[in-house]
Image (spheres, helix red, strand yellow):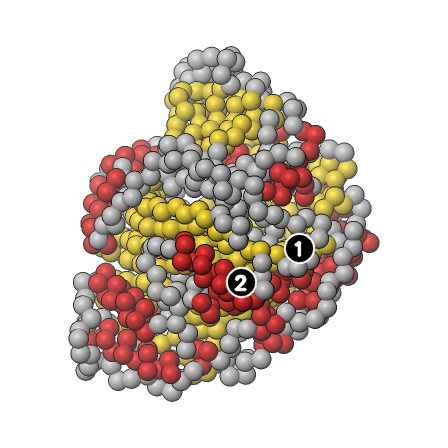
Amino acid sequence: MESTTSLSASLDAEVLRQRLASLAHAEGVRRWDLGASCSTDTSVQVDRGEAKQMKGAQRSAITLRVWNDDGLVGITSTSDLSDAGLARALAGARDASAYGNVDEIPDFSPLATAPLPVLEQPLSTPLSILTLLDTLKDAERDLLARHPAIGTVPYNGLAQRSSDRLYINSDGACRQQRLSTASLYLYARAEEAGRKPRSSGAVRLAYGAADLDVAGCVQEAAERTIAHLDYAPIATGRYTCVFSPEAFLDLIGAFSSLFNARAVLDGVSLSRRESLGEQLAVPFLSLHDNGLHPANVGAAAFDGEGTPTRRLSLLEGGVLRHFLHSEATARAFGVSPTGHAGLGAKVSVGPDWFEIGPTPGSSGGAPGLDRFAAGASGDDHGLVVIDSLSALHAGVKASQGSFSLPFDGWLVQDGVPRSIEAATVAGDIRTLLKAILGFEGPAKVTPDGLCPHVWVEGLSITGDA
Amino acid sequence: MVVSPPTGALAATERSASPAALGDPAWRSVLEPLLAGGRSAGADLVEVFLERSDHLGLLAEQDSITSVSPAFGAGAGLRVFLGERDGFVSTNDLSAAGLRAALEQALGMLGLVLPVQAGGRFDGLPELRDFAATKEGWLHACPSLAEATGRLLEGTDRLQTHGQHLQVRRGSYARDWQEVLVAASDGTFARDVRLHQSVGLNVLATDGDHRASLGRRYGTSDSPDDLRHWDAEAAAVDVCSSAGSMLYADYVEAGQFPVVLANRFGGVIFHEACGHLLETTQVERATTPFAEMVGQPIAHPSLTAIDEGLTAGAFGSLSMDDEGMEPQRTVLIENGILQRFLSDRAGERRTGHPRTGSGRRQSHAFAAASRMRNTFIAAGPHTPEQLIASVDKGLYCKSMGGGSVGPTGQFNFAVEEGYLIENGSLTRPVKGATLIGDAKEVMPRISMCANDLELAAGFCGSVSGSIFVTVGQPHIKVDTITVGGR
């Protein structure tokens, strides 16, 4: 019978490093690194005033990477942090290293011991699960009372997490980050007699459940849901579209292989090595990846290879400035790692948190954009406001640049919005980036980044009018 | 460059999980006090789900193995019911103390306290129903790492042979071994071993500004030899043929059209448009329009739909579900009439729909929920050619991508490989299509079913995580649906 180490949400990095060093020495492994995490979660869901499900979880995970005598790398992952589990993972990684990729051998990040950024991340004491339950019941009751058509809040949840993550390597790097986070989501379903059901919602994040903006979440979920009650079909055609900050960030995230050095090297990005310096978007668009932004709740101070997180300019004046890198891709490009690596047999690269807006000193595109102004679209069609995109996993072909996505939104004619019954928006990301007309309003903080409303001309909308 | 796979066994990662671990009779003495304690605390039902897992993932790119990702783990999920409420706690700590702490936490969620002395409300576990008895050797019988990497490289090599303008050639393989033990205070005590293997080929074809990315994935369950039997040649020909067709395809014209969906993964339309809405989790959330329609027509009279977990080797088949119940063949819709819902333990307690052996979860970290297994539309009387011949102007969807359904019953899915139907014949390839619709409106429009039912493996993500499923159908015709395009 197996017994694993009992875990609360904490790891002792130094103890783990010593255990690994001892086991590695015994196995004859001289070079290794490790990513580990553990967490304690509690969460609740409710259904019309009753607790639907309450959950708790204690999780642990490590990914162990070793270099064999030929310099090849192998890994193994496990949830078992006992000595037996670590020994088995070590042996497994060593065995897997026989199949390591000779064409690209990862190394320790040269920045794995560089100073880390100081993040303001207050640690919160978890609330009792019954307090979470009462909070969510109150939020649901409040949301249900906002409109008679709102009958249920079928997707809801209030969760809190205490977690620890670390990175250690055999050269002495030892990173550790302790974090507490909380999240609230409320997705309401509303239905009026003789009409189709409609749904929308909102999400909030914070460093502790007591700090969540529950009232704001309820208000936003109610507003968004109610705003979709009066709907009509839309005629198929080309429209000027206004993306909400959330929708535009989702779209850019789905095409982040444009900025991903791993994807470039693998040949699956629309960008190439020589694309740096090319005009990718309108000359007033700026795009940064900035995991360190104060509004990025739960920001990681370092990536899977121990490289410090940092702000990186991707597009400036619409020109492609930098790629996101791991240690290996950075070495291939002759630059420094950027802090965007995961830890795996093949090290992945991904963005943290986008900042999108006008390039400082630029015109910022068309001035004074207001989607509710009379005649804003400049034609008889009206404007299409895209509130949220769906099915990005299926409707985005990142390596082709194309997308065809269902969305929720409104058709705005003469300043009056009316929800669109059902529609898709389709296009090519490269064309879209050069068809941006401008930005409307201040940038909004969302869970995925910072972005204002973005106007784009000439997108294909398919409706069923 | 071409890298030949090293030979030899990978002892530690492939052979080290102990298949008999959850078959150890000593588990009874750990589990019975937990179940007795939970019942004595006042719980209506206590369930313990124990899991051990062993995973191997491989990736080949061009002519090299670029990723070998072994993983192993263990954990438990403890669920306590009191009336219609439940508390669920998962943990990686399988020690007796760790399990007891998890039980205390789950009881505490319902306002219950584990008594110092248990007794009176639990009669002990019966004899173990051991579905794993004949499966102990499965993990050992799977292809070695040398063999598996060799087969993947064979696949990418075949892509090179049959493809044109291929910028990227990828092959991937995943082997998931899982041992589970379920014990509950209602007398459930059962063990099983599951084995799922899947292998896929993907290409990115480019020529100037033309780009096409295509992939196919094949998956089976409970057969260690399946990778050995995989027809890499046929798979490569299939992928390369599709990539060749789609490389120069125009974008599809948007609008409302009749569509004919091919068999196999075409079944994703039923999975998304209707299958999820027939899970009791949707009844519980009041998000299905079919909740009160058992015995009433919800689809075209030509349509019969089934969900089952019995087909030998199918990706969604299982000897028992994740609540210890043997799966059934569940007729969901017969000749257009709604027959029943897929139900799990919680679904039965909360909605009254009897369990169907459909309680499924990705791992111990998720509470089981009513989920699909092998879900398909039954074969009809027509030939595929008759369906196509019945359409003057429409879309033939030969290969489907993923899809989803929202809380209002609006569904969508992507078409990977499409062709125009003009005057009853297939003409040009088209790309970029997304089909969207509303379940209540679309189901009555599936007016013709062909006689060529086939299943295809897939992964389904929902409330209890990502699980192995199959979708399936014969060729079907939908009289009209919204085709999103340019």
Q: How far, Cα to Cα, is label 2 from label 1?
A: 15 Å
User: Is the residue at mark 2 from the same chain as the one at mark 1?
Assistant: yes
Q: Relative to residue A182, is residue A299 drawn left or right?
A: right
Local secondary structure at mark 1: loop
Which chain letter goes with mark 2?
A
Instruction: Using the image as rendered, state which of residue B406 and residue A428 is in the foreground.
Output: A428
Instruction: Using the image as rendered, state which of residue A93 and residue A421 is in the foreground.
Output: A93
Is residue A193 at least partly visible in the picture?
no
Residue beneath label 2, please?
A24
The x and y percentages for residue B151 are 72, 64
What residue is at 27 percent from the left and 64 percent from the top?
Answer: B106
What residue is at 35 percent from the left and 82 percent from the top?
Answer: B28
Q: Note whether A31 is above or below B166 in the view shown.
A: below
Local secondary structure at mark 2: helix
> Seen from this angle, which residue lies furthest bottom?
B127
Q: Crowding near pointer 1: few (<14 within 10 Å), some, many (20+)?
A: some
For badge 1, the amino acid type reads Gly
Placement of the C terminus of chain B among the 4 image quadrants: top right
Which chain letter goes with mark 1?
A
What residue is at 20 percent from the left and 79 percent from the top?
Answer: B118
Residue beneath label 1, please?
A71
Is residue A297 at least partly visible in the picture?
yes
